[in-house]
């Protein structure tokens, strides 16, 4: 094994790189999950707004 100036072996560097890659993958997965959850919330809010608009139009039609 080759030792570097900071005392880490090549194997330790490979483990660190693997850990960084795995962490980056997990962060990416978490971000995708958050985006999916935000889209779901946005869809629910949109449906709620559409329902409120239908109710308002119906109430207006009944008032005329």
Image (cartoon, helix red, strand yellow):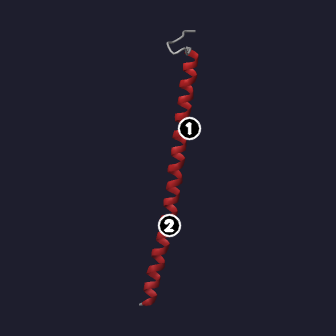
Q: Residue, x 50% and y 73% (percent of image)?
A: 51
| Disc assigned to residue 47 | 2
Mark in the foreground, 2 or 1: 1
Judging depth in this view, the residue of 46 and 12 nearest the camera is: 12
- In the image, residue 52 sits, relative to residue 23, either above or below, namely below
- In the image, residue 5 sits, relative to residue 16, either above or below, namely above
**Residue 19: horizontal and vertical position, in percent?**
57, 28
Badge 2, how many Cα within 10 Å: few under 14, some, many 20+? few
| Disc assigned to residue 4 | none
**Residue 49: horizontal and vertical position, in percent?**
47, 70
**Helix, strand or loop for disc 1:** helix
- In the image, residue 52 sits, relative to residue 59, either above or below, namely above
- In the image, residue 25 sits, relative to residue 17, either above or below, namely below
Badge 1, how many Cα within 10 Å: few under 14, some, many 20+? few
Q: Label 1 belongs to which residue?
A: 26
Q: Residue, x 47% and y 76% (percent of image)?
A: 54
Position of 64 with respect to 15 (left or right) is left
Q: Residue, x 46% and y 88% (percent of image)?
A: 62
Looking at the image, is mark 2 or mark 1 earlier in the sequence?
1
Judging depth in this view, the residue of 28 and 12 nearest the camera is: 12
Quadrant occupied by the N terminus = top right
Marks 2 and 1, how far apart at CA: 32 Å
Question: Of all residues shown, which one is farthest toward the front?
Answer: 6
Q: Residue, x 51% and y 44% (percent of image)?
A: 31
Quadrant occupied by the C terminus = bottom left
**Residue 28: horizontal and vertical position, in percent?**
51, 40
């Amino acid at each position: 094994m080759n030792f570097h100036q900071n005392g880490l072996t090549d194997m330790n560097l490979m483990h660190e790189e693997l850990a960084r890659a795995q962490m980056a993958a997990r962060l990416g997965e978490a971000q995708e999950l958050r985006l999916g959850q935000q889209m779901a919330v946005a869809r629910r809010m949109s449906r709620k707004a559409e329902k409120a608009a239908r109710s308002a139009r119906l109430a207006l039609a009944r008032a005329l």
